[in-house]
Image (cartoon, grey):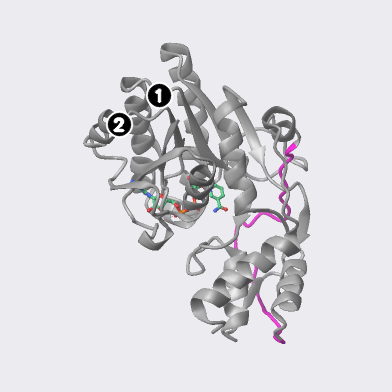
Amino acid sequence: MKVLVTGGAGFIGSHIVDELVCKGYEAVIVDNLSTGKKENINPKAKFYEQNIVDSSLIRVFTKEKPDYVIHQAAQVDVQASIKDPIFDAKVNILGFLNVLECCVKSNVKKIVCASSAAVYGKPKYLPIDENHPLNPESGYGLTKSVMSRYLGIYHQLYGLNYTVLRYSNVYGPRQDAGGEGGVVAIFINKLLSNKDLFIFGNGEQTRDFIFVKDAAHANIMALEKGDNAVLNISSKTQISIQGLFERIKYLTKKEKEPIYTESRKGDILHSCLDNTNAKKILHWEPVWSLDDGLRDTINYYINIYGGK
Ligand SMILES: NC(=O)c1ccc[n+]([C@@H]2O[C@H](COP(=O)([O-])OP(=O)(O)OC[C@H]3O[C@@H](n4cnc5c(N)ncnc54)[C@H](O)[C@@H]3O)[C@@H](O)[C@H]2O)c1
């Protein structure tokens, strides 16, 4: 079985490729390396440096004839989607549509797509299940919510099967510590390098973190299960940002106190996704505890930065 992974040089995509290779699938990566890295690329996978927006994408599909597609490539920065919604829509809507068209033209059996908790906006109740209203508050959340509507239409028109996975906060090795997103990566790197570390507000805001290898595994399970379903992928466990800081401080054995700054405008106070449906439908469940996942991530950063 051949699986084409868009964004396979990125944080989550590269872990998906690793598991595919490990399980004996043939893996093909399409990535333009805009945020992905060559060093993330599994040497057993075939790599195409290719923008998903370009019409030349069909050549990769025609040549490789993948059985399945796992779509991770995206403009992933929420703030960037507010500053430049046109670029966000180009990648996350037009690029995605280009991938869909290629799937139909080359008879792909199924596409598994990465979505986000950002589609829900401010929670009306917790934990958020898949029936929660969609009230995205950024271009990013909106473009992610549009994906499932297109998938429904492509399924009706062309019989293309799909699963949409709405991830909560994914963390783990290879996450970019420089960007806006990965609070885990940022905390670990600040602690290891003994740099000032900031917490927005009082740190009592809570999030639901899922380890990247658990998120990757959900994608592999979705190749065979969960046809035409939209599923939350999360740990369904809330931890405060202060609590997260304390765990990382304990595990890195570093003595440092955070600096508390003003809350960010629009930041959601509490967020937690219900993963009941994914467990039932995909026969998947998170197996990494937060401490084990944090240890694995800390070891990764110690190895690449020598703990500096
Ligand atoms: N990290 C999270 O917590 C999180 C949460 C919810 C959803 N997601 C979604 O998961 C997916 C993977 O995100 P990630 O965290 O691994 O980010 P990432 O930036 O590490 O991965 C995205 C990959 O897509 C590639 N890419 C971007 N634009 C492209 C284009 N036009 N053509 C080809 N390749 C392109 C990048 O080079 C990168 O390798 C994304 O769809 C993201 O929206 C991530």
Provide the secondary structure element on which disc 2 rests: helix
**Total marks drawn?**
2
Q: Position of residue 279 (x, y in %)?
A: 73, 35
| Left or right of residue 141: residue 273 | right
Q: Identify whether 104 is placed above or below 191.
A: above
Residue nearest the observer in this picture, 307 or 181: 307
Q: Position of residue 260 (x, y in %)?
A: 68, 77
Residue type, numbered disc 2? Phe
| Left or right of residue 290: residue 61 | left
Q: Position of residue 165 (x, y in %)?
A: 58, 37
| Residue under the image location 56 percent in, 84 percent down | 193
Mark drawn on residue 108: 1
Q: Residues within 10 Å of mark 1 (few under 14, many from 20)?
A: many
**Occupied quadrant, residue 6:** top left
Residue 45 highlighted magenta (yes or no):
no
Provide the secondary structure element on which disc 1 rests: loop
| Residue under the image location 62 percent in, 76 percent down | 198
For the question of whether residue 205 can be seen, the reply is: no
Q: Identify whether 267 is placed above or below 218.
A: below
Q: Which residues are magenta?
A: 255-275
For the question of whether residue 189 can be seen, the reply is: yes
Name the residue that disc number 2 marks.
61
